[in-house]
Amino acid sequence: MMDTERLIAQLSSDVPPIRGYAVPRRIAAGLIGGAIVTLGLVIAWLGVRPDLGEAMQGGAFWMKSGYTLSLALLAILAVTRLGRPEATESPWLWLLVVPVLLLAACGVAELLRVPQTQWLAMWLGESWRVCPWRVLTLAAPIFVGLLWSFRRLAPTQLRLAGAAAGLASGSFAATLYCLHCPEVSAVFVLTWYSLGILLAALAGALLGPRLMRW
Amino acid sequence: MRYSEEELQGWMTGGLDGHAADHAMLLRALVPLLGGFYRRHARGNDADIEDLVQETLIAVHTRRGTYDRGRPFTAWLFAIARYKMIDHFRRNRRLVPIEGMEEELICAGFGDASDARMDVAALLGTLPPKQAAAIRATRIEGLSVAEAAARSGIGESDVKVSVHRGIKTLFARIQGDR
């Protein structure tokens, strides 16, 4: 074992200045890096929906991406907090119920407008079988980007930090998946998008303690 | 030598601004602070403690970007120190945490109990065999006076008298020892 005085001398020989907001910068870098890969996957593997311009005029597109993006922003705030050693929990995560409840309200309003015979078709859409798995797959590059960010951060609650990182990856991935997905119903998004995001959070919670140790 | 929160925070901020001398001052000041922290919270030999202090110094160095200027420095430091300690316990079982040491306490209780048994055995050894046997039978093994009398083939009153005299002698001996 090296003696402590020599260790200190060695560590002090390399002291580059640290800019302000180092934690958010590092997280943004990992997030954007991962998101570029995910965007590439959406374009090359799934393809952007041909009627995207038209869809962006309507409400359903913004309802979907608004839901996933608000989850993503809350999750990334939690990640930023949990990257510091003093954080033991994140109050941001409790706010996640707000977008969920808003979307649920949209879903109820939507169901009340159509006859009951259409409910099942609305809920399952065209792609319920693949939607959660696609969201989970698209989350992987973003999760890897965030793991890279965490290599310079100091999380002390690894499971929670992993879950928050998974949640952020899943919801950003779902936001980008909106560029492809033609589904329009709120109950579809509430169920199948959320399931994919939840799977990503679960994967993060399982992987966090293993991959975020420092 | 204790350093104040302001001094430590000043050196930390200096290090973040790229001043190597401040950073070195900080790390040197942390050595006794962390050593004290780990000795209070863990039992282990000096090499283990030093190992842990060094790991924490490296962590403070490599993760210094996670310190937010203006927040309390020691809260940040001890959060890292605590994490490093728990991580160390997990990887390397030589260091034992003092907090949450239930198993350790149960073992220590067992040790006390066996010490007490040995003391009793030694004391009884100093009594005449009849008194010692009567005390062992009625007070330690929990037999009734009648059972003890039947076992050693003496009268019940003889057992009672032996127990009484023996305990009186033991009391006198213990008090005499003080």
Image (cartoon, grey):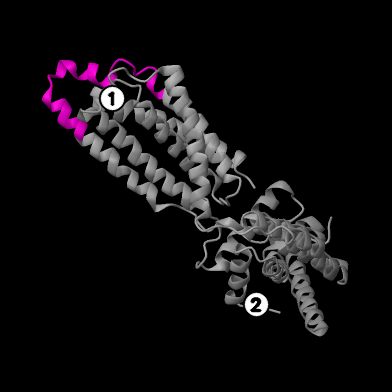
Q: Nearer the viewer, residue A166 or A206?
A: A166
Which x, y percent locates residue B141? Answer: 73, 58
User: For residue A151, which quarter of the picture?
Assistant: top right
Residue under disc 2 on the same chain as residue under disc 1: no
Q: Is residue B147 visible?
A: no
Callout 1 amino acid: Phe
Q: Nearer the viewer, residue A126 or A13?
A: A13
Q: Mark 2 sits on what residue?
A: B3
Which residue carries the number 1 mark?
A188
Please tell me which residue is depicted at 52% across the width and 40% down the height of the picture.
A30
* Cβ–Cβ under 8 Å for marks 2 and 1: no
- B50 vs B70, left or right, is right
Which amino acid, by three-letter code, is at mark 2? Tyr
- On the image, the x and y values in percent for residue A49 come to 33, 19
Image point (28%, 25%), residue name: A188
Of all chains, the one bearing label 2 is: B
Q: Measuring 65% from the left and 59% from the top, which residue is drawn there?
A: B60
**Stretch of the chain drawn in magenta:** A106-132
Chain label for disc 1: A
Residue A118 shown in magenta: yes
CA gap, disc 2 to disc 1?
59 Å
Magenta span contains residue A206: no
